[in-house]
Image (tube, coloured by chain):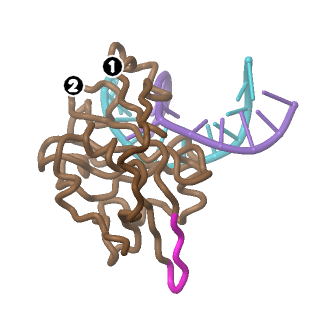
Chain colours: A brown, B cyan, C purple
Amino acid sequence: MPKIIPQKFFNRPTLKVAQELLGKFLVQKIGKKTVRGMIMEVEAYIGQKDKACHASRGRTERTKVMFGKAGYWYVYSIYGMYYCLNVVTEQKDYPAAVLIRSVGDIKGPGRICCHFKIDKKINEKPANKKTGLWIEDGGVKTKTRQIKRAKRIGVDYAGKCKNKKWRFFF
DNA sequence: ACGATGATGAAC
DNA sequence: TTCATCATCGTA
């Protein structure tokens, strides 16, 4: 039986959460329709010292959700045309999140939000069934699967942080 | 290789 | 209130 990932799963070190999210399922329910896909690629954004993290410039209207409790969605718009989906990690007041970069066949955070119906309406909402977007354990043996890691994408501006290998994928 | 396209945050 | 920037993508 698929198990909904509880809020406390996210209230842990971000690098650990990021890797363990691989192989789990992003699930969305809209009315009677359920959309589902396996998480294949993620990136970690951790704390104010991480120059690539949006929260590195401190608490703002956009980033305040990252300072909040773990297990909440952080959705932001980028380049005027796309949305990116993140889930907040770590304890309250420690800003960090995991960007979901690939789900199933869908590569790229912008395309994920297009395929799932994700926009700022779910920003700052918890990842649970009531919200209509959550994460499930597939009940499959993903533990044994090899995880690859690499530098994050699109963060060349982030000084030495750009070289951190905080992208994880199968 | 590049343009679309608008929210965001910092400067003024 | 302006202005540069941007965790992207499709077209070429």
Tell me the residue that label 2 is attached to: A49
Q: Which span of residues is magenta-colored?
A: A30-36
Whether residues under marks 1 and 2 lie with C-beta atoms below 8 angstroms apart, the answer is: yes
Q: Residue furthest bottom?
A: A32
- Name the image quarter holding residue A13: top left
Q: Nearer the viewer, residue B9 or A16?
A: A16
Residue type of the residue flagged with mark 1 = Cys
**Residue at image point 32% right, 43% down:** A18
Q: Nearer the viewer, residue A119 or B10?
A: A119
**Residue at image point 49% right, 47% down:** A40
- Residue A34 magenta: yes
Q: Nearer the viewer, residue A71 or A168?
A: A168
Tell me the residue that label 1 is attached to: A161
10 Å neighbourhood of mark 2: few (<14), some, or many (≥20)?
A: few
> Which is the main secondary structure of the residues drawn in magenta?
strand
Chain bearing mark 1: A
Q: Secondary structure at mark 2?
A: loop
Horizontal side, residue A46 vs residue B6: left or right: left
Q: Residue furthest top?
A: A160
Chain bearing mark 2: A
Q: Earlier in the sequence, mark 1 or mark 2?
A: 2
Q: Position of residue A167 (x, y in %)?
A: 41, 32
